[in-house]
Image: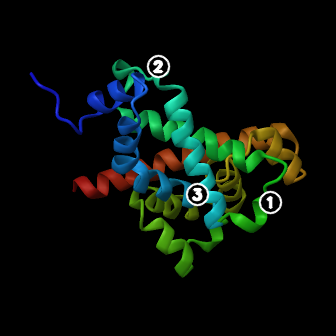
């Protein structure tokens, strides 16, 4: 069976052979989705573009690490994006409070515009928003902002044990809410 010229296998093959057109094809196929993901966490346009560029440079440099057996090319790019965004958010030069959408801005027009690029993330934020505020803030920091549990404890001036326990309870509560949502949809 012949590969499509735009198939992931063809694109990754070109990149592995260091052919620039493979990178162009990868960028054309996935740049909008990657940029949308980056913008969910970084609102400053230049910084978001810089992070997106870093994602594609990492993909080019680490193409040999992609394993089709472990998942789709897009899934691999999403993981690179997630790690790159977290690295940026944790960097000393990045001001988290100025360039991130806190959970409370879910209803704002700017946040809604960014969220419209990925409805599943918006739906998750809506579920998180229905949590008790003690849990909501922890999930906001851990999932949406990429903080580690120790960073959350330090930022919120809270014992690490309390953070771990509340994050666990928050995740359990989210599971209940998700199950309830699935049952409502199935009915």
Can residue 41 be seen in the rendering of this structure? no
> Which residue, given by chain and number where applicable, does mark 2 sit on?
64
Task: Check disc 1: other Cα within 10 Å, few if <14, some if 14-19, many if 20+.
Answer: few
Q: Residues within 10 Å of mark 2 (few under 14, many from 20)?
A: few
Point out which mark residue 49 bears: 3
Horizontal side, residue 146 vs residue 131: left or right: right
* Percent x, y of residue 158: 87, 48
Q: Which of pointers 1 and 2 indicates the residue nearer the eye?
A: 2
Residue at the disc numbered 1 = 95
Distance from label 1 to label 2 (Cα)?
33 Å
Closer to the chain start, of discs 3 and 1, is: 3
Q: Position of residue 104 (x, y in %)?
A: 64, 71
Residue 20 visible in the snapshot: yes
Which numbered dot is residue 20?
none
**Residue 171: quadrant of the picture:** top right
Q: Are marks 1 and 2 in contact (CB under 8 Å)?
A: no
Which quarter shows the C terminus?
Answer: bottom left
Secondary element at tag 3: helix
Secondary-structure class at tag 2 = helix
Q: As displayed, is residue 93 above or below residue 60?
A: below
* Distance of label 3 from label 2 (alpha carbons): 24 Å
Q: Is 155 situated left or right of 186 in this image?
A: right
Q: Residue at x 47, y 58 (%)?
A: 36
Q: Nearer the viewer, mark 3 or mark 1?
A: 3
Q: Secondary structure at mark 1?
A: loop
Closer-to-camera residue (10/169): 10
């Amino acid at each position: 069976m012949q590969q499509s010229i735009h198939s992931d296998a063809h694109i990754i093959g070109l990149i592995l052979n260091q052919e620039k057109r493979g990178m162009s094809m990868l960028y054309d196929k996935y740049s909008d989705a990657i940029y949308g993901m980056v913008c969910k966490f970084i609102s400053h346009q230049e910084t978001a573009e810089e992070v997106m560029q870093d994602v594609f440079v990492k993909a080019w440099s680490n193409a040999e690490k992609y394993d089709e057996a472990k998942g789709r090319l897009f899934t691999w790019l999403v993981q690179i994006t997630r790690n790159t965004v977290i690295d940026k958010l944790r960097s000393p030069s990045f001001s988290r409070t100025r360039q991130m959408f806190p959970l409370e801005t879910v209803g704002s027009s700017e946040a809604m515009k960014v969220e419209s690029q990925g409805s599943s993330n918006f739906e998750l934020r809506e579920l998180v928003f229905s949590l008790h505020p003690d849990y909501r803030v922890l999930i906001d920091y851990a999932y949406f902002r990429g903080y580690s549990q120790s960073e959350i404890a330090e930022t919120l001036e809270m014992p690490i044990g309390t953070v771990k326990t509340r994050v666990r309870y928050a995740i359990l509560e989210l599971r209940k809410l998700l199950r309830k949502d699935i049952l409502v949809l199935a009915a």
